[in-house]
Amino acid sequence: MKKRIWIGLLSLVLVVAFAFPAMAVWKDMHATVYKWTGGYNQDGSPGLTRLTSGVIVSVLKHDNDSLLETLYVADSQKFTSLANPITAALFASSSYCNGEVAFRVDPAESGDSEVDLIVTDTNGGYTAVVSGFNEYTHTIIIDERPNVVHHGQIRFKYSTTDQTSTGVTLLSGQLLHKIITSVTTNLANTYAAIGTGQDASAIKAGDSLASKGWVQTSYESEGSIWKMVWSTHSGGYHMYPVYGSVMTNDTSLTYSVSSGGTPAASAQTGSIHFWFSYGPK
């Protein structure tokens, strides 16, 4: 009788041992997102405000900014696909991310024990870049202090020449110091124009996205809702949106991609990087 029990237990151990390695590579990752505007609590700790909406998350393969991970909804019995980048709507949805960075990583992709994140607050474009994010990282803090130069980043995709919103909304009084495009999928004879919902061609990311890497941004013209101010400190132009009756209609940061031929749908083309400061009145 004892022998049969031990044989049964051994069989169970063997079944578990062979069944679990296939599932072990799945990684469910979670992190709460906070913003810090520079204040402190009475005990000296930073005064943080949790963000449960208005956040866009790009999940990239670790140390490879040209490859987006394949994502699924975390903690689910079903393998429900999750868009990457994770939109603000999916981030806030109780059916997907439930107001936090939450996703399951595809085991078919090697080295998925850690990933890199671009976490952007759409209200102004404040961004936290997290390298080596893993299942043990549970807090992400976005620096949103006023009167400090910040580096915002948002992914863009070349799938149409139509003007497309990045999802970022500019703030009244927000000063844009510089905008540069980084290309991860090279596109010959192609350029990106960056602006707002009503003037998407005020800034152009060079004449070509033909080579991977940084593309120097050129300022084409002021346009109807942009102003350029020469800075003796930096030796270049600063641009800022003019807020008035026009800007109240659409303050979204947008881009369009132009080509001599028909645009070919592709993976994420790269990122729009923008340096800005904001000092509310």
Image (cartoon, grey):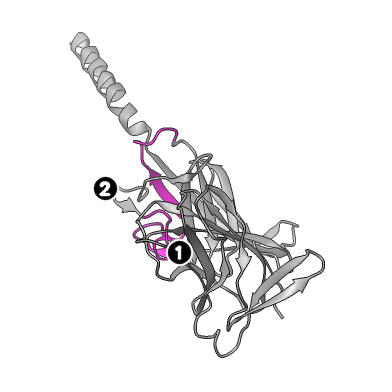
> Closer to the camera, 209 or 268?
209
Q: Residue at x 74, y 62 (%)?
A: 42
Residue 22 in sight in this render: yes
The residue sitting at the right extreme is: 232
Magenta highlight range: 83-111
Q: Residue at x 50, y 85 (%)?
A: 249
Q: Secondary structure at mark 1?
A: strand
The residue identified by callout 2 is: 78
Residue 243: give x, y in percent of width and height: 61, 84
> Closer to the camera, 190 or 240?
190
Residue 130: give x, y in percent of width and height: 57, 48
Residue 253: give x, y in percent of width and height: 53, 71
The residue identified by callout 1 is: 257
Is the C-beta separation of discs 1 and 2 under 8 Å?
no
Q: Residue at x 24, y 13 (%)?
A: 6
Amino acid type at circle 1 is Val
The residue sitting at the bottom extreme is: 245
Task: Indicate the quadrant where residue 232 lies.
Answer: bottom right
Identify whether 99 is placed above or below 109: below
Q: Quadrant of the N terminus?
A: top left
Residue 27: give x, y in percent of width and height: 41, 40
Q: Which mark is residue 87?
A: none
**What number of labels is visible?**
2
Amino acid type at circle 2 is Lys
Q: Is residue 101 magenta?
A: yes
